[in-house]
Image (spheres, rainbow, N blue to C red):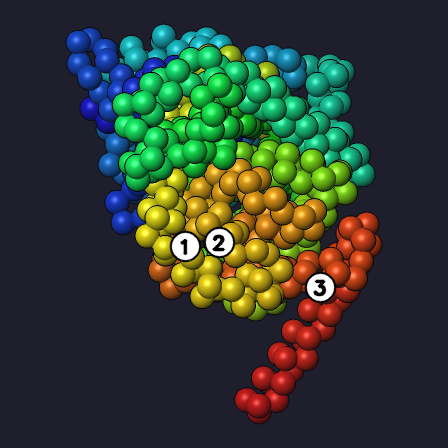
């Protein structure tokens, strides 16, 4: 039997799904689309039944691809488990009554029942069950309350007992239901509710968002540095003896030693894992000792904000800003995901409504947003030269983000719809669900990161031994040395950056770059091309044609930003460079729309 969890977005379907299915879940693409859904299994009465978490929808007359897929999935289900938000019963019942048209057995879950109680909302579940003709169960996805009652109700589920209604009559019918089953009592706002209001306030909201995000990223980076130092000590204690032993077995002068272990340094000293450049030294240490601590911390923080209910508020706050670059606030979700890893960020663009939004979001994100591991390494590499160089790196990335976004807004055809998003109440996430999500994301990271990092180190070593690196360095010398002002040796880091950007940043340290060169190098590494894993997903989400356009845009942005830094670095101090970039954003926000308007009028005159 196929059981479908249906409902509006942000009603707690995923939490209920997690309680019903446990940890044995899979994520798949719906056939013929890029929309994914989560599938698990429920064992009841000695039989195994499929449970599917359907994408959230508001109506059965959908426009977005995810909503169309949800409607098709509902048509193929055997029993519908309709999850409704107890604090917004009237709006949720609109979808419930529409689902009656499928004539399928249904169970209704009054989820977030604790929030309703806190808000002074009482719903008579028995009376609602009598009116609709189906079982109604109070549940709490955060604590698991009421979950045990669901399987028994599902296998004796009945069809909705309501008349056929037009849209106008449906709302009137819902109003009648609400009068019979729902009671409200006066209550004062709690501290949490006051905080909810402040977090979307037009003045205080952006300030709170900046403070929260800066504090959390600061926490991640500080804790990541601490963990990296501890893991480095652990590597030296537990892993170095094995590497020294293996070095003695292989022999210290052969090609195999160079490929697998690299330069270990004197036997009496510790191994410099970042500079060794061996598959089993630098490859393993970069993935596990440098990258993984930051990934774990980011996903812990991101998962907390996600389940707390803050991310939808961030989307509302940033909606006006993102409209400046042809997007709306919902694009902030993929961008925040990309701060952890670009791959899930690109996957998340599928939830945006139009091709224009998906293209602009993906291009801006893959071009200008470094992953968390890369960000931490950028801060470490630039921070050793002084805080102003960190500011210069991120001011440059912000400038490219803004100018590129304004350019794409004027040149990419299509419309950006108004933001329509459910803003859920704040809820403290459960530890079990947090750890479960972290485990799933961490397994995904390990599956992708370690092969690419180790494969990248091996590829660089092979290219170095065969002389290909030297040839590529000479071929691109006019660009690397002339336009970007970087030494030829930077090419090796750029090549490995195609596989892992974080590993590439770690490989800049042995090159002994100047202060301004380190800024140029990390900016170029961020902008010029996404890693292979991200590019593969980019093709999947946008198609080969749009992915090709995206790559050309990235190269153009890289050359422009690199040339600017190279020229400005000779004429200005880092402080004036940061100020000039801020001024550039202001100027281009005026110039680009004006030029676009002139071009549009010119094309119209030609047609006439």
Residue 167 appears in the rendering: no
Mark 3 or mark 1, which has the lower sequence index? 1
Query: Which residue is painted at 68% across and 28% down in the image?
Result: 218
List x then y, in percent, for residue 608.
57, 91
Query: Which residue is painted at 67% across and 48% down in the image?
Result: 514
Left or right position of 540 against 599: left
Q: Is residue 196 depicted above or below 323 in this figure?
A: above
Q: Residues within 10 Å of mark 2 (few under 14, many from 20)?
A: some
Query: Which residue is painted at 49% across and 43% down in the image?
Result: 504
**Nearer the observer, disc 2 or disc 3?**
2
Label 3 – label 1 distance at C-alpha: 27 Å
Q: Nearer the viewer, residue 581 or 423?
A: 581
Q: Residues within 10 Å of mark 3 (few under 14, many from 20)?
A: few
Mark 2 or mark 1, which has the lower sequence index? 1
Label 2 – label 3 distance at C-alpha: 20 Å
The residue identified by callout 3 is: 567
Circle number at residue 491: 2
Judged from the image, the secondary structure of the residue bearing numbered disc 3 is helix
The residue identified by callout 1 is: 469
Judged from the image, the secondary structure of the residue bearing numbered disc 2 is helix
**Nearer the observer, disc 3 or disc 1?**
1
List x then y, in percent, for residue 536.
36, 49
Mark 2 or mark 3, which has the lower sequence index? 2
Quarter that holds the N terminus: top left
Q: Nearer the viewer, residue 351 or 3?
A: 351
């Amino acid at each position: 039997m196929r059981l479908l969890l249906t409902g509006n977005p942000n009603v707690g379907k995923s939490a209920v799904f997690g309680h019903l299915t446990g940890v044995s879940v899979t994520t798949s693409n719906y056939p013929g689309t890029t929309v994914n859904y989560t599938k698990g299994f429920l064992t009841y009465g000695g039989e195994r039944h499929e449970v599917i978490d359907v994408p959230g929808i508001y109506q059965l007359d959908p426009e977005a691809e995810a909503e169309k897929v949800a409607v098709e999935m509902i048509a193929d289900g055997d029993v519908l488990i309709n999850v409704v938000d107890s604090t917004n019963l009237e709006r949720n019942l609109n979808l419930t009554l529409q689902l009656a048209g499928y004539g399928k057995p249904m169970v209704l879950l009054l989820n977030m029942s604790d929030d309703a109680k806190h808000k002074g909302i009482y719903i008579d579940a028995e009376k609602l069950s009598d009116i609709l003709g189906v079982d109604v169960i109070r549940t709490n996805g955060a604590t698991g309350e009421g979950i045990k009652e669901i399987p028994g109700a599902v296998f004796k589920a009945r069809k909705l007992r309501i008349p056929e209604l037009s849209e106008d009559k449906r709302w009137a019918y819902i109003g009648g239901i609400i009068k019979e089953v729902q009671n409200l009592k006066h209550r004062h706002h709690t501290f949490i509710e006051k905080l909810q209001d402040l977090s979307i306030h037009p003045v205080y909201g952006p300030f709170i968002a900046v403070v929260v995000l800066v504090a959390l990223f600061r926490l991640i980076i500080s804790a990541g540095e601490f963990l990296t130092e501890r893991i480095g000590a652990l590597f030296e204690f537990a892993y170095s003896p094995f590497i020294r032993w293996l070095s003695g077995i292989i022999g210290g002068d052969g090609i195999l030693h160079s490929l697998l272990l690299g330069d270990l340094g004197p036997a009496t000293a510790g191994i410099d894992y970042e500079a060794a450049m061996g598959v089993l030294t630098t490859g393993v240490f970069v993935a596990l000792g440098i990258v993984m601590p930051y990934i774990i911390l980011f996903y812990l923080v991101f998962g907390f904000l996600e389940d707390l209910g803050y991310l939808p508020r961030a989307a509302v706050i940033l909606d006006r800003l993102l409209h400046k670059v042809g997007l709306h606030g919902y694009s902030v979700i993929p961008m925040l995901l990309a701060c952890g890893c670009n791959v899930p960020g690109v996957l998340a663009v599928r939830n945006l409504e139009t091709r224009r939004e998906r293209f602009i979001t993906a291009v801006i994100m893959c071009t200008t947003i470094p992953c968390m591991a890369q960000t931490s390494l950028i801060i470490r590499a630039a921070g050793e030269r002084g805080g102003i160089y960190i500011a210069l790196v991120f001011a440059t990335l912000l400038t490219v983000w803004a100018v590129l976004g304004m350019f794409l807004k004027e040149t990419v055809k299509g419309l950006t719809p108004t933001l329509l998003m459910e803003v859920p109440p704040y809820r403290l996430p459960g530890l079990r669900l947090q750890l479960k999500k972290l485990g799933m994301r961490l397994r995904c990271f390990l599956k992708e990161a370690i092969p690419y990092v180790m494969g990248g180190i091996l590829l660089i070593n092979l290219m170095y031994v065969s002389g290909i690196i030297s040839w590529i360095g000479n071929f691109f010398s006019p660009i690397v040395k002339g336009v970007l002002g970087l030494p030829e040796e930077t090419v090796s880091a750029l090549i490995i950056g195609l596989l892992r950007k974080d590993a590439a940043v770690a490989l800049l340290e042995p090159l002994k770059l100047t202060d301004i060169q380190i800024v140029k190098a990390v900016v170029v590494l961020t902008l010029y091309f996404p890693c292979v894993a991200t590019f593969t997903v980019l093709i999947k989400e946008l198609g080969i044609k749009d992915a090709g356009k995206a790559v050309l845009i990235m190269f153009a942005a890289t050359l422009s930003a690199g040339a600017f830094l190279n020229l400005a670095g000779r004429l200005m101090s880092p402080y004036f460079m940061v100020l000039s970039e801020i001024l550039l954003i202001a100027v281009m926000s005026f110039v680009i729309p004006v030029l676009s308007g002139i071009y549009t009028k010119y094309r119209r005159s030609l047609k006439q």
